[in-house]
Image (cartoon, coloured by chain):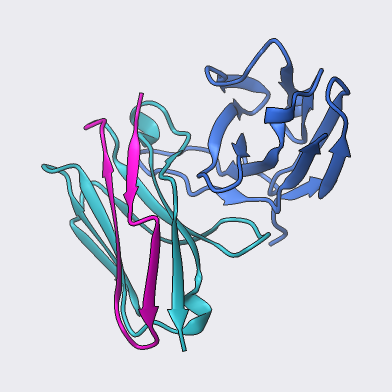
Chain colours: A blue, B cyan
Amino acid sequence: EAGVAQSPRYKIIEKRQSVAFWCNPISGHATLYWYQQILGQGPKLLIQFQNNGVVDDSQLPKDRFSAERLKGVDSTLKIQPAKLEDSAVYLCASSPQFVGLAVDTQYFGPGTRLTVL
Amino acid sequence: GENVEQHPSTLSVQEGDSAVIKCTYSDSASNYFPWYKQELGKRPQLIIDIRSNVGEKKDQRIAVTLNKTAKHFSLHITETQPEDSAVYFCAASMGDTGRRALTFGSGTRLQVQP
């Protein structure tokens, strides 16, 4: 099966500019996650969607970050304005619809490496 | 919220030796514990996971153990090979009982010397 797709793979911007990332999850996966991975650290959750609704955005810096998942499929993550500390890899992951007591495995995309100068 | 600590941060072993990476978690409600392998510049890849209803799981050269009482879990790699060199992350989540997003450890850089 096709994996999680992300674009662009790399982006370089100057601080105070805006940037957007796109994610296409595995077909049929209802849950979509955006994680931020700073160099040398583990991924940290930014936002979780279930279909097109937000489940958890408690760690999303809402003054500058926004995300949407229209029609419950693709998702976009936007940063406006960007700061130097936003330099990181932005990973998108998806998992199947929760059923019963089974915990869903998360499948990651290749990520977008953002450099803010 | 959940906090996951991972040790060691770096690990160097000789080819053929075993490697052990340990993680502790803080929230007793966590019930799902995956391990991911991440090669340089690539996506995290799930290599093994364990749920709270079992204490140990094995898949060829890789095994994971879970001690729910002590709130720690470990990854064991036997007969290590150079291609095992990568960064390994442990993670925890509450699955369907609550927060399903993963909380990751800080990673262990494993280097297998030929």
Q: Nearer the viewer, residue B46 or A10?
A: A10
Q: Nearer the viewer, residue A89 or A73?
A: A89
In the drawing, does residue B15 fall left or right of residue A96?
left
Residue B91: x and y in percent read 40, 45
Residue A8: x and y in percent read 85, 45
Task: Judge whether B10 appears above or below B103 on screen.
Answer: below
- Residue at position x 68%, y 24% from top? A52
Q: Is residue A61 visible?
A: yes
In magenta stretch: residue A43: no
- Residue at position x 60%, y 36% from top? A35
Looking at the rendered image, the quarter that the N terminus of chain B falls into is top left
Q: Residue furthest top?
A: A63
Q: Nearer the viewer, residue A25 or B65?
A: B65
Numbered range of the magenta stretch = B1-28
In the drawing, does residue B58 fall left or right of residue B102?
left
Residue B109: x and y in percent read 46, 62
Task: Judge whether A64 appears above or below A4 on screen.
Answer: above
In magenta stretch: residue B7: yes
Location of residue B94 (image quadrant): top left
- Residue at position x 63%, y 56% from top? B43
Residue B47: x and y in percent read 45, 64
Location of residue B60 (image quadrant): bottom left
Q: Nearer the viewer, residue B107 or A98?
A: B107
- Residue at position x 59%, y 28% from top? A46
What is the count of numbered marks?
Answer: 0
Q: Is residue A30 visible?
A: no
